[in-house]
Image (cartoon, grey):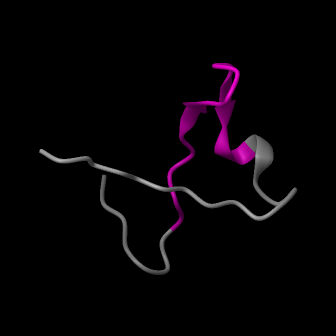
Amino acid sequence: MNLSIGKRFPDLELPDHANNMVKLSDIAGKFPLVVVYYRGYW
């Protein structure tokens, strides 16, 4: 995935807290959205 400043973020589909799949485009603009990527200790 090639992310850079000024480019559109890909429309990912991720599980929510209840394990339901949600697209970022479905929730973007409704409230502040923060995407955090945590790689861990590897």
Q: Is residue 14 above or below residue 38?
A: above
Task: Determine the residue positioned at 77% across, 41% down.
Answer: 26
- Name the residue at the top extreme: 19
* Residue 2 spot, x, y in % from top left: 30, 60
In depth, the one of 14 and 10 nearer the eye is 14
Position of 37 compared to 18: left or right?
Answer: left
Residue range highlighted in magenta: 8-25
Q: Nearer the viewer, residue 41 or 3?
A: 41
- Name which quarter of the figure residue 12 lies in: top right
Q: Residue furthest right?
A: 30
Verify whether residue 33 appears in magenta.
Answer: no
- Residue 19 position in % (x across, y down): 63, 19
Q: Position of residue 24 (x, y in %)?
A: 66, 45
Question: Is 41 rendered above or below residue 9?
Answer: above
Quadrant holding the C terminus: top left
Q: Which residue sits at x=50%, y=51%?
A: 10
View extreme (left): residue? 42
> Who is closer to the viewer here, 6 or 21?
21
Q: Is residue 13 above or below residue 26?
A: above
Residue found at x 18% / y 47%:
41
Asked whether residue 15 is drawn in magenta, I would say yes
Q: Residue at x 43, y 80 (%)?
A: 5
Residue 21 against residue 24 in the figure, above or below: above
Q: Is residue 2 left or right of residue 14?
A: left
Q: Hey, which quadrant is residue 34 in on the image?
A: bottom right
